[in-house]
């Protein structure tokens, strides 16, 4: 397949913000792609060369791309820097300079999708002495063969700045439209006026595609199964030990009665720990530990592997757990922010194990002896956990819980949970399946506080006076349909000026600096990656921001980038729900 064909798709996707149009463009393209072409196409339209759970990244800096553009186009570095400063987009700079060169040389080399995909994957494998020069040659080779507009998209993909609006929902629907046209046709063509029967059949198909994705975290695998094996192939997708799946997520409730009305009586109530999800995989002597964001942190937590060997029976399983930090002197739980630094650290592991120990609390099981347990009822999965785990407090144990139908008993247990240093309770439906990646009514969180928001930084401003060296004001956005990010306000409080005092302006500046895409005066636009948990006094209607809402007196609570990605932040629907809830509370 010619890369120009994929670029034409990028242009189509970039030309509209309408979800249905994006879905139609992508589905038509997928229908024409061969089974071998599906993987590179699906990944490249997401701006990736590996699935989301794969920790390998292209990892190329702006300045290396500047050099590659110079090498491919023959333009001086200074000229490229000037054009970049003017446009703020290296992709457009590459397009302009490569187009000019090709007009002069009349070169006819055609770039293929395979060539782009292979070169970009090779970039991730290059390390050590001479690797920078080899990366430069690989990028310059692609740009030298590219036409102008192709150079724009090669550059954006290399830098992780593709952004053509293909979120998970559009990818899922595109697979349905591409490979199951008879089921999708009536829904597609009736513009929302399809019969109830057609809509039900279509929704069942989407649920199968979503379920297959939730078990693999790779739309390329799902699309290939759909194309080559149809619905049967989707049904055969299984959990694979070593390959992380998205953990089941909880909805929030404000009262115990509301929780019990949703999950039924009796219900299982467990401590809600202020830690981080840890998906623990074992296959014989091989172990993998994944965070909620599917990051492999096995190397960062070697003691957890020892706990699993010592405290858990069996040699093939996937456990769902919460790792919570505690003070080694007082043995009391500490906030997530205290322990979060261990997630990213790759050095001084042994020292950190002593200074910042974690206790692993097991609360569910996803796979056992090669059997997928997601369809089994929760109470059976929990019994299996209890039969497998030999508790060792401070290292690994089963989450503290009770089963009750009494609101007063659960409230008493809630008070005990708070007194023990946790955030509150998780309240669970006893006969519920495990639904990966979904917020469903099977598992509810009860904290008795106004819910904070997880939002992504999309822009920032350099400070003034003593804060001039820091990016100290942050523009925050929530997520909307199709993955669009909508600004909801600006925050500049809650952070410390010294690192030793806690989460600081200096740390956020360090995180944001490599993500800067454009700058105008004190204002910078950044790649959306850094997730902040934000508290606020209230949500207000506001025409100032795209979301239509603003946060009154927002303040930063903590950095959640290690736990969550942009797809996990709060949505506009969440904000609207909290706004309505707030109105009811005010009476």
Image (cartoon, rainbow, N blue to C red):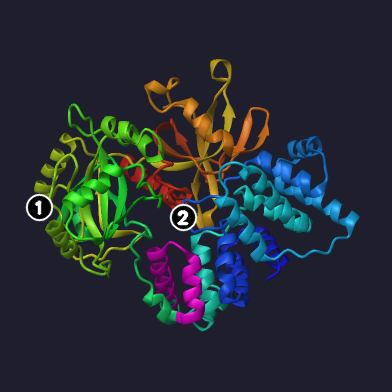
Which quarter of the figure has residue 30?
A: bottom right
Residue 426 appears in the rendering: no
Q: Total number of numbered labels? A: 2
Q: Which of 512 and 159 is in front in this view?
A: 159
Q: Where is residue 206 in the image (x, y as percent from the top left)?
A: 44, 72
* Above or below: residue 420 compared with residue 280: above
Give, as a single range, the part of the protein colored magenta: 202-230
Numbered tag placed on residue 54 in the rendering: 2
Q: Position of residue 508 (x, y in %)?
A: 49, 31
* Above or below: residue 149 compared with residue 324: below
Q: What element carries label 2?
A: loop
In the rendered image, the quadrant that contains the N terminus is bottom right
Q: Is residue 203 magenta?
A: yes
Residue 579 appears in the rendering: yes
Give the labeled residue for mark 1: 406
Q: Position of residue 177 (x, y in %)?
A: 54, 75
Q: Is residue 471 magenta?
A: no
Q: Nearer the viewer, residue 318 or 288?
A: 288
Of labels 2 and 1, earlier in sequence is: 2
Q: In this view, does 547 lie to the left or right of 314?
A: right
């Amino acid at each position: 397949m010619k890369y120009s064909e994929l670029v034409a798709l990028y242009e189509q996707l970039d030309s509209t913000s309408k979800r249905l149009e994006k879905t139609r463009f992508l589905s038509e393209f997928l229908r024409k792609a061969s089974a071998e072409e599906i993987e590179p196409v699906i990944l490249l339209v997401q701006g990736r060369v590996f699935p989301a759970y794969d920790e390998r990244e292209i990892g190329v800096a702006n300045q290396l791309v500047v050099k590659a553009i110079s090498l491919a186009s023959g333009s001086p570095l200074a000229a490229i820097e000037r054009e970049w400063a003017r446009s703020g987009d290296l992709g457009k700079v590459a397009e302009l300079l490569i187009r000019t060169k090709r007009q002069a040389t009349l070169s006819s080399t055609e770039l293929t999708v395979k060539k782009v995909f292979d070169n970009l994957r090779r970039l991730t494998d290059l390390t050590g002495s001479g690797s920078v020069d080899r990366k430069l040659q690989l990028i310059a080779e692609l740009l030298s063969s590219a036409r102008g507009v192709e150079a724009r998209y090669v550059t954006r993909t290399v830098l992780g700045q593709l952004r053509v609006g293909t979120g998970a929902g559009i990818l899922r629907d595109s697979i349905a439209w591409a490979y199951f046209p008879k089921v999708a046709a009536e829904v597609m063509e009736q513009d929302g006026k399809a019969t109830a029967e057609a809509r039900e059949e279509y929704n069942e198909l989407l649920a199968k595609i979503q379920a297959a994705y939730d078990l693999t975290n790779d739309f390329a695998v799902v699309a290939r199964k759909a194309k080559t094996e149809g619905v049967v192939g989707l049904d055969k997708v299984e959990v694979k030990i070593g390959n992380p799946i998205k953990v089941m997520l909880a909805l929030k409730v404000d009262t115990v009665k509301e929780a019990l009305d949703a999950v039924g009586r009796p219900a299982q109530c467990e401590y809600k720990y202020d830690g981080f999800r840890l998906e623990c995989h074992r296959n014989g002597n091989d172990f993998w530990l994944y965070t909620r964001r599917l990051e492999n942190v096995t190397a960062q937590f070697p003691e957890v592997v020892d706990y699993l060997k010592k405290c858990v029976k069996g040699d093939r399983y996937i456990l769902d757990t919460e790792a919570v930090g505690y003070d080694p002197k007082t043995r009391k739980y500490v906030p997530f922010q205290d322990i979060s630094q261990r997630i990213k650290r790759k050095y001084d592991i042994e020292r950190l194990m002593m200074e910042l120990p974690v206790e692993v609390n097991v609360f569910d099981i996803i796979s056992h002896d090669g059997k997928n347990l997601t369809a089994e009822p929760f109470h059976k999965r929990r019994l299996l956990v209890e039969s497998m785990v030999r508790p060792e407090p401070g290292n690994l144990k089963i989450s503290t819980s009770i089963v009750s139908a009494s609101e007063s008993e659960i409230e008493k247990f809630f008070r005990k949970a708070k007194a023990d240093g946790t955030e509150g309770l998780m309240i669970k439906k006893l006969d519920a399946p495990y639904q990966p990646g979904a917020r469903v009514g099977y598992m509810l969180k009860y904290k008795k506080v106004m819910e904070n928001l997880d939002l992504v930084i999309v822009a920032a401003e350099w400070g003034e006076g003593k804060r001039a060296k820091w990016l100290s004001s942050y523009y925050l956005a929530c997520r909307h349909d199709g993955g669009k990010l909508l600004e909801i306000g600006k925050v500049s409080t809650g952070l410390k000026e010294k690192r030793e005092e806690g989460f600081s302006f200096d740390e956020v500046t360090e995180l944001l600096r490599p993500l800067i895409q454009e700058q105008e005066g004190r204002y910078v636009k950044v790649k959306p990656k850094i997730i902040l948990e934000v508290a606020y006094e209230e949500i207000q209607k506001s025409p100032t921001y795209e979301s239509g809402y603003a946060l009154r007196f927002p303040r930063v609570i903590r950095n959640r980038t290690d736990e969550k990605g942009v797809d996990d932040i709060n949505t506009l629907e969440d904000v609207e729900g909290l706004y309505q809830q707030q109105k009811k509370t005010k009476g």
